[in-house]
Image: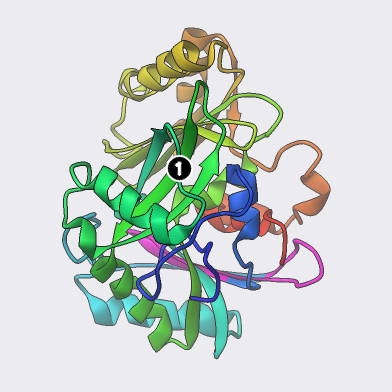
Amino acid sequence: MSSPLTGVSSRAPIGVASRSGLARWLDAIPHPPVACEIGPRHVAAARYTRTAPGLEDYAVESLPEGAIAVSPVELNIVDAAGVRSAVERVLRRIHVRGQQGTLLVPDQVVRVFLLNFETFPKSSEEALPLLRWRLKKSVPFDVEDTVVSFTRQASPGEGVGVLAAVARARIIRQYEEMVEAAGLEPGVVLSSTLGVLPLLEADRPALLARLTGTTLTTVLTRGDVLCVYRCSESEPAATLTPQALLAEMYPAVAFYQDTWKESVAQVRLAGLGSRYEEFRQAVQAELGVNVAPLAPPVGMAERSPGDARGLMDRNVESLVGWMMNRWV
């Protein structure tokens, strides 16, 4: 692990951000020019240019059914040979070996918490034990068997807001071993939707509902502050109803309005495939706000090359979002 601000990794403790805010947290993470996502149904990899956020090449491979059983508690990779083979193929197709890269893992693997403290230590040596104590009753595994990343962010009231990402070390290590075997060093490990967040407009409160397989992640951001993060089991896109999607969105909207004293300004949807328009109409009619597919924001279009659309069309928008982060 090359930086104290790297999402989560099994290799080293994670430190505290020197600057507050979600955007700064993501910006502070190293951005190697290769990223690989291992999802429940696919493996995807992309290689970016070093001089600007441009996409040089990408590859996507489907995984055998049941190869990965996503869980925050139990080991995930059931068919290690099948997953390893898919990782090797996508990295070979984009001509990557012996480099450091970013590894994106399923949302259910990484638990995200939004916490508030009256005071919060400035040093990571004092902050990490406090976070582990606070999270002890909130994670479904031994808190000592975790890797933790965190950053301070604005709070709607008094005190200090803290965004924490927590995962079970042995599960993260499983995913790391898959890319290491294919010749990629996982210098950064991040959950898939955290990688997507740079695609949300920063100027207005934005609600994202993203379906990946049978996981629905609902996120609400306000500038560089993550205000709501919820990850739950869901029906797949083929059988999910607009009412069920709205039922997941209502609590996020209500909480935001009550806490931040303002309304959500926009909704972005991802992962709904051919049924997108059906859901768009239902959500827009119910919430009365602009609803659109997840895409690079206006003003960032010139930084999103046309071939990046192929990644978004194949439901690996996390690799495009990661590309939008500042290079360091």
Q: Position of residue 298 (x, y in %)?
A: 77, 36
At 16% across and 61% down in the image, what residue appears?
74
Q: Is residue 323 magenta?
A: no
Q: Is residue 50 magenta?
A: yes
Q: Which residue is mark 1?
A: 120
Residue 14 visible in the picture? yes
Image vertical order of residue 82 relative to residue 121, above or below: below
Q: Position of residue 41 (x, y in %)?
A: 34, 59
At 22% across and 42% down in the image, what residue appears?
138
Image vertical order of residue 20 relative to residue 149, above or below: above
Image vertical order of residue 185 relative to residue 23, above or below: below
Residue 178's image quarter?
Answer: bottom left
Quadrant containing the C terminus in the rendered view: bottom right
Q: Position of residue 28 (x, y in %)?
A: 63, 59
Q: Residues within 10 Å of mark 1 (few under 14, many from 20)?
A: some
Q: Secondary structure at mark 1?
A: loop
Residue 108 visible in the picture? no
Q: Position of residue 241 (x, y in %)?
A: 32, 24
Residue 320's image quarter?
Answer: bottom right
Point out the stretch of residues depicted in magenta: 35-56
Q: What amino acid is at disc 1?
A: Phe
Of residues 197 and 120, the one drawn nearer to the viewer in this rendering: 120
Count the marks. Answer: 1
Q: How is the image coloured?
A: rainbow
At 69% across and 43% down in the image, what residue appears?
296
